[in-house]
Amino acid sequence: MELRKINENCYYFSSAVNAGYILNEGEGMLIDTGIDDSSIKKMLKILLQENLPLDYCIITHAHTDHFGGASYLKKKGIKLFAPVFEKAIMENPLLEPVYLWNGAFPLKELRNKFLEGKPVEIDEWFSPGEMKVGAFKLEALHLPGHSIGQAGIVYNDILFAADSYFGQEALEKHIVPFITDAQRTIETLERIMSLSVEGAVPGHGELERDITATIEANISLHNKLLGQIIDIAGNSKRDFDCMLKEFLDLNGIDAGSLGQYLLYRTSFTAYLTKLVSDGILKVTLEKNKIYISK
Ligand SMILES: [Zn+2]
């Protein structure tokens, strides 16, 4: 993990999961916390070494790799902020394995640190728009798609984009990125591309001064995956689970664990929902089986 300076007031901790850090008038604010106590401790150690203050933390969304260190910060007296929908999940993180397991109480193997972070009470929730916290005046953006209530932060001309887009390397690694809503994911990407900022930091990837090519790569990947699902549906009635298997196989994915498979299933379902809303595919239930057809 390395702290990189972007401009006078903006920094980020470059790591497998990035976190932002902003500074103004002797006050400091983190944007996300990394996955666990060990990642947040590393950040705190670096801030101490660099003699940088910490007073607040904004959490962009309720995925454990972004809020897992929040309960440690809370114990240290740092004030926590989050979008209202994401706040509800961080305070009740059992919800994530619950929704992956179709709403039922989850299997033990789904209750791991990647799917269920430590519960943490968020001090204040925020809505999109201008936000004043101590010495900071920032702009909170609503960037839904990857998660339902995800926020991005613009401060001093830098966009802290959370997982609204992935760096090109991360995009290639994930193959099928995690999304909850394909339509909103694409709308969010188009919106980010139209922002006039001096640079952007995604949750996974590096700072880029011009994000156009990266955003275009994200949009074209989503369009490619949507096209694949239309092709797999073909002209006959297809079984949902068989289609999902064919989709993963086509992309060379072996989920390897139930948790990972369920995350892919959520993305597949999100693409399918868009195709149904667009009138391209239909979902029907026949004799206790879900079918997909044109
Ligand atoms: Zn995420």
Image (spheres, grey):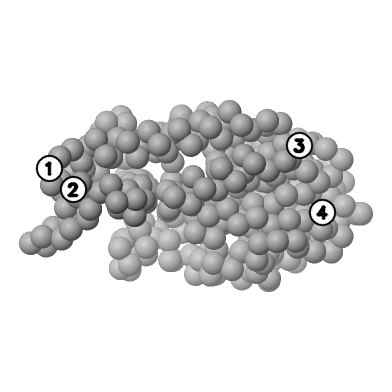
Q: Is residue 100 visible?
A: yes
Number of residues whose C-alpha sits closer than 10 Å to that of mark 4, classed few (under 14), some (14–19) or many (20 or more): many
Q: Mark 3: which amino acid?
A: Glu
Q: CA distance from mark 2 to mark 4?
A: 53 Å
Task: Give the residue drawn at x 80%, y 64%.
Answer: 132
Which residue, given by chain and number where applicable, does mark 1 sit on? 236
Q: Earlier in the sequence, mark 2 or mark 3?
A: 3
Q: Quadrant of residue 256?
A: top left
**Marks 2 and 1: CB-CB under 8 Å?**
yes
Q: Is residue 290 above or below residue 81?
A: above
Q: Earlier in the sequence, mark 3 or mark 4?
A: 4
Please tell me whether mark 2 or mark 4 is closer to you in this view. 2
Q: Residue furthest left?
A: 287
Disc number at residue 128?
none
Q: Mark 2: which amino acid?
A: Ser
Query: Dot 1 lies on which element?
Result: loop
Which residue, given by chain and number where applicable, does mark 2 sit on? 293
Disc number at residue 28?
4
Please tell me whether mark 1 or mark 4 is closer to you in this view. 1
Count all numbered tags in the image, as a single digit: 4
Which residue, given by chain and number where applicable, does mark 3 sit on? 198
